[in-house]
Amino acid sequence: MEPAPQCGTAVDLNVDAGESFGPWRMGNDEAVFPLVSTVNVACGFHAGDPSTMVDALRLAKRLGLAVGAHPGLPDRVGFGRRAMAVSPREVHDDVLYQIGALAALARGVGVQLSHAKMHGALWSPVGDEPEIAEAIVRAVNDFDPELPLFVNPRSELDGAAGRAGHPVVREGFPERGYLADGHLAPRRLDGAVIDDPAVAARRALQMATEGTVTAVDGTTLHLAPETLCIHGDNPAAFEIATEVRSALTSAGIAIRAV
């Protein structure tokens, strides 16, 4: 068994954001942004549109938050969470295109991107395919070799980034269940999505202080995450963010961008 990571005194708290499209509303960026230190802005493929992206960027700038690109598969109907048959070439070009689009809008607002993070099925299961993971890393590296990539610890994407020498930030999900192998539990399974703010807060504190999380089968996983994610589309996102932030700060853990 791996030794438990040492407790940290600070952790990043991020939220997936900018996921509305036209008149269709998803999430509550205005309420959640003040509670986090980093935001991941959808880039128009799984969700988002240019005006929504600009709104998210402006709000993040006003609040002094770090901003990352959140590319997804071209699947608005499935919100980017359906596994699609895509080639490494398609993934490389799509990811690079999306980061570039957000970067252009960010430049206009006066914001510099701090990281990239894949969304939904592009994170897993599609992103777990070795050739796809390598294509993602190449795309981010082609945009900026120094731009950190948020990854699931010990995932295929984590490994591909390590082999390429690309910087990563390891991420944990207090409001998502884990399988014993470290993957996120499929959303159809019981315990896969946590909407109880108190439970999410306890898990966030465990991740931040012990570096571990309890999987759905009771297995203890050693993750040592540097950033914790709250899904903006979770109906309880505001309540979860509030409880998580309170639990962390009460324990003396500062919340700041990596």
Image: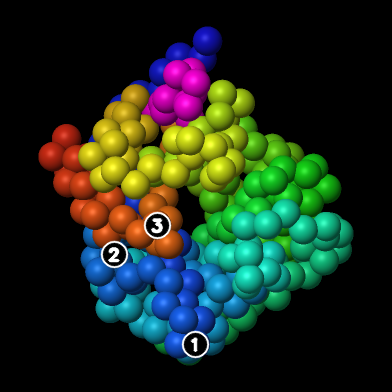
- Residue type (three-letter) at the residue carrying disc 1: Gly
Closer mark to the observer between disc 3 and disc 2: 3
Whichever of callouts 1 and 3 sits on the residue coming sooner in the sequence is 1
Residue 22 got which mark? 1
Q: Is disc 1 placed on a helix, strand or loop? A: loop
Residue underneath mark 3: 234
Q: CB of mark 1 within 8 Å of CB of mark 2?
A: no
- Residue type (three-letter) at the residue carrying disc 2: Val
Left or right of residue 147: residue 219: left
Q: Is disc 3 placed on a helix, strand or loop? A: loop
Please identify the quarter of the rendering in which residue 39 is found: bottom left
- Tell me which colouring the rendered structure shows: rainbow
Residue underneath mark 2: 32
Residue appearing at x 44%, y 44% in the figure: 193
The 10 Å Cα crowd at callout 3, few under 14, some 14 to 19, many 20 or more, is some
State the image coordinates of residue 18 (x, y, percent, origin top left). Answer: 45, 73
The 10 Å Cα crowd at callout 1, few under 14, some 14 to 19, many 20 or more, is few
* Residue placed most toward the observer, 228 or 137: 228
Residue appearing at x 56%, y 24% in the figure: 180
